[in-house]
Amino acid sequence: MADKKSYRTAARTQIADYLKNNADRALTVNDIMKHLEEKSVDVNISTVYRYLGRLSEEGMVNKYSADSGDVALYQFAEPARNCDSHLHLQCVKCGKVIHLDCHFMDEINEHIEEHHGFSIICKGSILYGTCEKCRNEE
């Protein structure tokens, strides 16, 4: 029984470390599974989904629904970033996530509320495009 528990702990540690080490981008479950496979960690995909769900509920991971909502993206939540108060920009080429945590968010919120009577909920919000580095490489 102890082996099973240490096995689960090893998989969870690998997942958490991979998310932390890639905090600048959002990852799919397939990215995480590939990493675990490379590290020779044999874990069921449903276990990964459950663990990511738990991390998301605890606020350790931001969960974004991509495009049509078919694919979820996960990113390590840096507590100091206060991701609930700003939008995120994700590069569709390299996966980099940029936090739009600047005064522009105040302007966006004010404009949308004043002119459209709408209040933005930023949690899980992501806009897609191409980052400067990838555009320069084209």
Image (cartoon, helix red, strand yellow):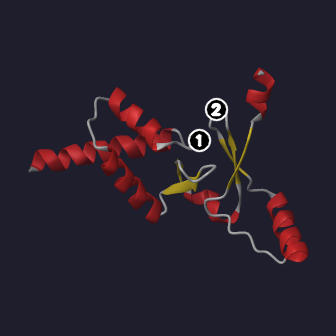
Classify mark 2: residues with Cα within 10 Å, few (<14), some (14-19) or many (20+).
few
Using the numbered discs, state the Cα–Cα distance from disc 1 to disc 2 in whole angstroms: 8 Å
Say above or below: 107 vs 36.
Answer: below
Judge whether residue 92 can be spotted in this image.
yes
At label 2, which amino acid type do we have? Cys
Where does residue 117 sit, x and y in percent of width and height?
Answer: 83, 78
Helix, strand or loop status at disc 1: loop
Helix, strand or loop status at disc 2: loop
Q: Which residue is drawn at 74% across and 53% down?
A: 100
Most extreme residue toward the left is 1
Most extreme residue toward the right is 115
Say above or below: 125 vs 43.
Answer: below
Q: Residue at x 48, y 44 (%)?
A: 20
Relative depth, front residue between 94 and 81: 94
Q: Mark 2 points at which residue?
A: 94
Q: Residue at x 49, y 38 (%)?
A: 21
Where does residue 38 sit, x and y in percent of width and height?
Answer: 36, 27
Classify mark 1: residues with Cα within 10 Å, few (<14), some (14-19) or many (20+).
many
Residue 25 shows which numbered tag?
1
Please tell me in which quadrant of the rendered image residue 15 appears. top left
Where does residue 8 sit, x and y in percent of width and height?
Answer: 24, 47
Residue 100 shows which numbered tag?
none
Left or right, 96 with respect to 115, comes to: left
Relative depth, front residue between 119 and 12: 119
First in sequence: mark 1 or mark 2? Answer: 1
